[in-house]
Amino acid sequence: MGLTLAQKIIKNHLVCGEMIAGQEIGIKIDQTLTQDATGTMAYLEFEAMGVPRVKTERSVAYIDHNTLQSGFENADDHRFIGSVCKKHGIYFSRPGNGICHQVHLERFGVPGKTLIGSDSHTPTGGGIGMLAIGAGGMDVAVAMGGGTYYITCPKIVKVELYGKLSPWVAAKDVILEVLRRLSVKGGVGKIIEYTGEGVKTLSVPERATITNMGAELGATTSVFPSDEITREFLKAQAREEDFTPLSADPDAIYDEAIEINLSELVPLAACPHSPDNVKSVSEIGAMKIDQVCIGSCTNSSLLDMLKVAYILKGKTVHPDVSLSIAPGSKQVLNMLAACGALSDMIDAGARILESACGPCIGMGQSPNSGGISLRTFNRNFEGRSGTKDGQIYLVSPELAAASALTGILTDPRTLGDMPEFELPEVFTINDNMIVPPVSAEDMDTVEVLRGPNIKPFPVSEAMSAEICAKCSLKVGDNITTDHIMPAGAKILPLRSNIPKISEYCFAVCDESFPKRALELGKSIIVGGSNYGQGSSREHAALAPLYLGIKAVIVKSFARIHMANLINAGIIPLTFADEADYDRIDQNDELKLSNLTEAIMTADELTVTNVSRGFDFKVKLDLSERQRAMIKAGGLLNYTRENS
Ligand code: MIC
Ligand code: SF4
């Protein structure tokens, strides 16, 4: 029986388990990446493991999220990460060098290799045929130490592409179409594998836009074949030796399949407040806009920027619109400057931002009250922009640039003929902002520099035999990690200070939650389906841990967040009968008994709603290893017990 492309990479890296969808497997990790907002914690955890040097083929730390230095905190964290990297064998991409996923694709990604990153958009690497997966910081720390990475073996979904995109219709429209069809939970437990004739019509940056935003499907990852187009890209990055051809076997068997005719696609937009709330531009109509932001790890490649510059050249941004542009990397920015495209953007009135995440994570550029903002980003969750009632639409760079000129949502196909935009044969390469580590012999000469904002992270206690606790919060469906642990310029600098950042836990839903939870001492959260979708931030588990959350009972979980809860020692439970969700109210007292035995063996537990006097069943959908981890009180305790 033939294998799919993802199965081939998994098979080559399989350490334990069988490649059967739904079963836990362990894979060897070749490369890791971290960014600064999750990195400080990941490196503190790595230090706690006591491994002197990373054991991966390549580990890279990027500074791209917390770049607004409005106090000492972010700069201190950057310094901490830089010094840890130097000592322990990790490459350090300095602030200004670019967004982790863009730079990794340009300079480090290798087809056929495995990569995990403490950022949910790590699947960007799938654009060059990597098996690239987003994970919690602690999982990345373990992988840096040479440990196995565990996932539930995913189902494989084939997305067959045929035809060719029409002029001014973009790769962004392909992934928006997939999101429209599958929804933000449609990819959970699945790998999305792109095949078909249409693949050949897409460049590496276009493929990377598609795999990047596969994160919004909840997918484990997304992957494209590695072909001649991949070779050309790597060659232009002076890395042709990293090329390996990779594709699925012709008789590969997929669990599900969908087809997309690229020729039929039209410009699309994800409307507020969910990436799967997708409509065509004509359905939305000529809406007046206040802001346009171009950039982020989804759409900040040279190709994207060249298209934007072409559209803006010789024109002026509409007087009612603020346009900001953040090229994805130093390489992109430099090449835009060299060819004059940057000047076209500046001339048109664009506000050029540094090569970093910026507005995508609420680091500046929050829109005006109720403001309508078109963004080339990947997430439009409520409040994420920093303006609670901001109306964020996710669109392609072409659509964003065309609309910035007119002040209304504009179909880019009205721009007329589209020239051929081609990638350069040679990119400008200067890795002077990537600092290599010192040699193992010299590591003792490096002092790790810790700022006063870095506080010890909470570690769970071993699980108790009985939990009798109040439901401190009841929330609905599709709760994101941006709800659980909001980001933005004000809160992000607290990422290395869990006690302090916990004060903002669930601030978007209920500002009184942290105080209430602390007063209760221990409590339980109840939620709906796809709980914890979105980012990989383990702070969305560590803050609840600090606030005394012992268990989370929901209709279903998003993958990375569930793994982070287990790593933190919080019990993730799902309703056996979803109707029971409606029978629990906030403040109800819930009791779980006989946990010590049940946690290791049972697939179902009985929970008593003491306040209302009834029992209901919850499922424990966990592997043996995960059960042992919860019993031990999380991954760190488990690792200590087993080493
Ligand atoms: C995001 O896009 O939400 C982030 C910020 O990149 C997160 C990581 C984080 O919260 O630090 C992600 O996607 O994992
Ligand atoms: Fe940065 Fe936004 Fe990409 Fe997250 S989604 S890595 S915040 S650019």
Image (tube, helix red, strand yellow):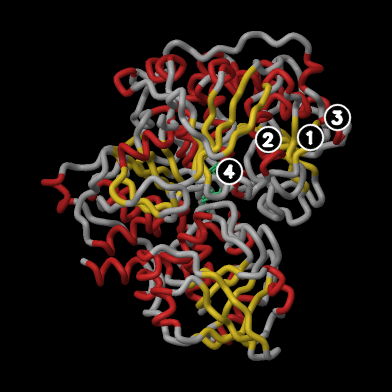
Residue at label 1?
321
- Between 228 and 504, the residue placed more toward the observer is 228
Q: Is mark 4 on a helix, strand or loop?
A: helix
- Which label belongs to residue 358? 4
Tell which quarter ligand 2 is in: top right
Residue at label 3?
282
Residue at label 2?
176
Tag 2: Cα neighbours inside 10 Å, few (<14), some, or many (≥20)?
many
Mark toward the start of the polypeptide (4 vs 2) = 2
Q: Would residue 346 be found to the left or right of residue 126 on screen?
A: right
Q: Residue at (60%, 34%) from the top-left corner?
A: 257
Q: Would residue 269 be found to the left or right of residue 628 on screen?
A: right
Cα gap from disc 1 to disc 2, whole angstroms: 24 Å
Cα gap from disc 4 to disc 2, whole angstroms: 22 Å
Cα gap from disc 3 to disc 4, whole angstroms: 30 Å
Q: Residue 454: image x %, image y %?
A: 39, 65
Q: Is residue 558 above or below residue 91?
A: below
Residue 83 in view: no
The N terminus: image quadrant:
top left
